[in-house]
Image (cartoon, rainbow, N blue to C red):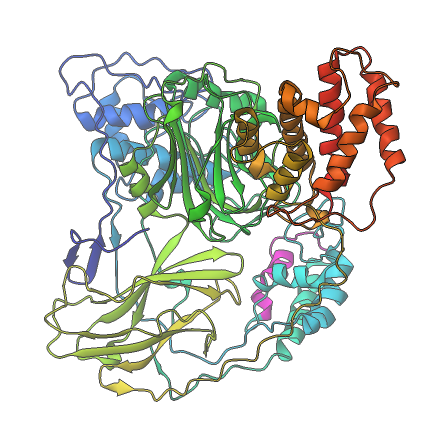
Amino acid sequence: MLTILPDQIFSRFKLVLLVISVMGIAACSGGSGEAVQRNDDYSRSDGETGVVYSGPTASTDDVQNFKIHLWDNLAGEDRCGTCHIQGGTSPEFVRSDDINLAYSAVNTLIDLEAPSNSRIVQKVSGGHNCWSSEPEVCGEIIANYIEAWANASGASSNVVVLEPREGYEVADSKSFPADSGSFADTVYTPVLVKYCADCHSEDSALQQQPYIASSDVDVAYDASRSRMNLDDPGSSRLATRLANEFHNCWDSCDSNATEMSNAIAAFAAAIPITEVNPDLLVSRALGLPDGIVAASGGRVETNVIALYEFKNDSTQIAYDTSGVEPALDLNLSGDVSRVGGWGIRLNGGRAQGSTNSSAKLYDLVRATGEYSIEAWVVPDNVSQDGPARIVTFSGGSEIRNFTLAQTLYNYNFLNRSSLADGNGMPMLSTPDATEVLQATLQHVVASFDPITGMAIYVNGELIATDEAMIGANLNDWDNTFALALGNELDGEHPWLGVVRFLAIHNRTLSAEDVLMNFDAGVGEKFFLLFNVSQYVSLPESYLVFQVEQFDNYSYLFSSPFFISLSEQAPTENIEIEGIRIGLNGRELVVGQSFANIDTTINAGNYNAETGVPLSSLGAILELDKGADLDQFFLSFDRIGTATYARVELAPPPAPEAADLGEQSQIGLRLFGEINATIAQMTKTPMDPLPGSVDTVYQTVRQQLPTLEDVDSFLAAHQAGVMQLSVAYCTALVNDSARRASVFAGFNFSDEVDMSNVDLIINPLLAGLAASEVDVDGTPTSLQTQPVPDDVKAHLYSLATDMSAADTHTTVIALCAATAGSAVMLLQ
């Protein structure tokens, strides 16, 4: 995350925040007469630029870096090489006769300190000759090329200039009510459902987001709030989409826009005005559009081969903006939605690339023999049975190249290699006791290389390693697999949560690289400069917050600091106590993390270069009208010599417990109970378990049920139960002393037939009935058990089907079928 650093340069009216990017100076000719280097990265679909350069050598290192990182990627005829060449359209920045002249032409088009501000980026983002279906995607790709050039030349400092912001008077306002009732009566039923439900509903054949006409009025309300302007209904997006863009008008677009505007006005008229408390000590007000964009540089991205920042609003595709061809774009299917502030929410759906484009991961990772998966994620909860697939490069539930997944409080990393099976087992998991996975925004990196093995980092810290994988290779990877997010390719292992960033590197990130990328943060951030000069004797004084839209429903405020944009230092103490954040004319009730601030700023602790940091906390605050319309302000219990006598409100009463309805009296045994029950049934000692059984149990333990709710049972649970049952029964049959005790009277030299099969089945059923216990030995059998003869009928049928098998195999099959049955699993 962007923080205030000691090397910041401060001048009159400006505060320069430097986030130094990784210096990756590439070797180059420097005018020495050596041939100009070609970019040998996998940067085009055929591994070539499509253009052969044979002109003069680069005169400087910077020209060479321009050639490698920008020219090579844009000089092809499918990009800019048709027009912007010698004798073509000016500027001739991809001319092929002289790289130095091309360099001179491009310098008027690029900004190495802030690549996204480059003229060429803005031109292409506006639709000029974009090779993708979305112009913004082409702009992002070119910005990444420029950033790579800047990093290689050591020129990118991602400068952010804090300039004065006057702001607005905190004004009375209207806020959206929590209840959707009035919206339903005025906007939803008479207009949206009537005219928009054929497309903008999850129940329609077209299913176009946003679901402003969903059959669930609350879903429609959430989708519509940011598209309605309560203070100026005519400027609402729902109305201007009809009036100005002629979007699916049902009659005359002008009259339809008026009808929509009138409906929103009727809704707004029923909402009371929120009046600002005149006694509050308030700053000036600001919205996100008044903020200064925070630099997002400082990331290590030298070896990124697939990159997803989710900046585009498409509800069909998540674009790969790495610039490494072929683009591994992901098709969104099922329940997947966009998240404000960049990201996608996965609710059982998935984002999946084609096998053809996914093959570049196979090619480029196997070429280096190492890789890192880097993601910013927000798991929905810590109860997801797993491994639930966050990111997977696989062919189905039982075969993969790699997977990053979740099981409860753990991250799992599966990697197919010469020392692991085709399913990436054994997998590496974060330790159970640390409960490192939480339902909040987290930075996760999973890495493999043959020198150090496997590793998982969370929020910049190394959490788990597997040195047993040292020396492994990736020669067994499969090039027919596909990259997917949020679910397995067969749909059997959904993960619920938000992915806000994903990068695949074909080199491992070092511990220092991981920490740098964690510190760089994720998403679009702004600095909001709240003017407080009226309360203090220091001119041009601001209290600054870093702010970003966290998701569709909230903002994240963090890293507040006090600064003056003048050259003066405080001449007297400045007291700051009890900072609260207000939204649209009212103090917010929740999320006031900064209310406990109590500090004094004076000449002794004030630093003209860094200001004075006020808190290391963050706060999640509600989104009301939308990022374009919400206005924030600060209030203070004390600032300077002004004070406000705050009366703390009594806490609200606890809500009534939710009525969950009738619950089943039948539940599942959990993983420990399953293990103990099968152990007793097969008379297997548990302290310690036989090695062959323990290995299987440790492998499938996280795959077994962790919740008693029968509705949570998955096919993966049954697969784990059966693997464990087979392991126990195999160990039993291979132990001559123990099998003689369990199957008394049965001769293992005889074949199994109907004359002796009861000598196997009866002890198994009797052992199962007597072995249904908790992990501490407490009986947990059902009061009503299955009829033995019914169970026997199934086992007889199995014995008949196994007639061609040998005795040991048949007994193992009968034992495993009994141990893995519902009789054992239910309690």
Instruction: Name the residue nearer the viewer: 577 or 790.
Output: 790
Name the residue at 24% across, 16% down. 36
Instruction: Name the residue nearer the viewer: 497 or 601.
Output: 497
In the rendered view, would you say 783 is above or below 495?
below
Asked where in the image residue 335 lies, by quadrant, the reply is top right
Does the magenta-highlighted stretch encompass residue 665? no
| Residue 203 appears left or right of 646 | right
Does the magenta-highlighted stretch encompass residue 235? yes
Instruction: Name the residue nearer the viewer: 684 or 192.
Output: 684
Residue 686, x across and y down, in percent: 56, 35
Asked where in the image residue 573 lies, by quadrant, the reply is bottom left
In the rendered view, would you say 428 is above or below 230?
above
In the rendered view, would you say 136 is above or below 737?
below
Residue 688, x across and y down, in percent: 51, 33
| Residue 418 appears left or right of 520 | right
Instruction: Name the residue nearer the viewer: 667 or 148.
Output: 667
Q: Which residues are magenta?
A: 233-249
Name the residue at 28% across, 82% down. 638
| Residue 287 appears left or right of 659 | left
Name the residue at 69% across, 26% down. 741
Residue 758, x across and y down, in percent: 84, 25
Residue 280, x across and y down, in percent: 37, 84
Residue 676 visible, this orientation: yes
